[in-house]
Amino acid sequence: MFQFFETIKVKDCQVFNLDLHQQRVNHTFNQFYNTFNPLNLEKIISDIKLPASLSRLRISYNQKDYKIELIPYQRRTIEKLYLIYDDNIDYRFKYTDRSRFIKCQKLLHETFKTDIEPVFVVKGYITDTTFSNLAFYDGKSWFTPKTYLLHGTKRVELINKKILNEIDLTPEDIKYFQQVSLIYSMNDLDEIILSITDILNL
């Protein structure tokens, strides 16, 4: 059984943000498998023929073994976001068990009959969707909540480049922004953008 996984962007036969993915793997091993050497992503990937087309390189792993999948990437269409208030959700590590997220997505889809994605509010603060970190645009700059669920690699990249600014963000603050972007390893800042009016249950 593979308890954790990484999803790495591949395009033009290159991988993206491998150092940030390795840092997250190292952190996971330190917390759960600290008597084992962390998985060496660069070594694993060096044995793979990488595609030119945009693809997801998924590496599922445990303390001793791993599995590699290369999957052509098709970007999701998200039409609405819905605030879900849940003080008990925890996704600090990239677990392969995403049943709680899937259940929540399914319930929203059945209720609204549209491509809708939950946004989790934890202890009064905006965090993430089931698959992405969030970035909010106020007409001049982009901001991301300090209170994320997962330490996303794209989020870290954009913060390091000073494109994103970290702030505390509550549902009441959303009205000060114009747009929201869903960012993760496969999605840059300009690829899934919704109007703030597309956020439901404010």
Image (tube, grey):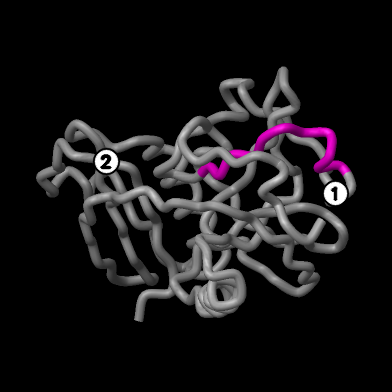
Q: Nearer the viewer, residue 165 or 142?
A: 142
Q: Amino acid at mark 1?
A: Thr
Callouts 2 and 1 close, C-beta under 8 Å: no
Q: Amino acid at mark 2?
A: Val
Residue 101 in the image: x percent, y percent?
A: 56, 72
Q: Earlier in the sequence, mark 2 or mark 1?
A: 2
> Which labelled disc corresponds to residue 110?
none
Residue 104, given in percent of the width and then of the height, sits at 60, 75
Range covered by the magenta-colored residues: 173-183
Could you tell me which quadrant the C terminus lies in? bottom right
Name the residue located 23 percent from the left edge and 61 percent from the top edge.
68
Residue 4: image x %, image y %? 43, 67
Q: Residue at x 37, y 39 (%)?
A: 18
For residue 197, what is the image quadrant? top right
| Residue 96 sits in quarter | bottom left
**Is 74 contained in the magenta span?**
no
Q: Nearer the viewer, residue 170 or 161?
A: 170
Q: Which circle, 2 or 1, is nearer the viewer?
A: 1
55 in relation to 161, above or below: below
Task: Report helix, strand or loop for mark 1.
Answer: loop
- Residue 170 numbered mark, or none: 1
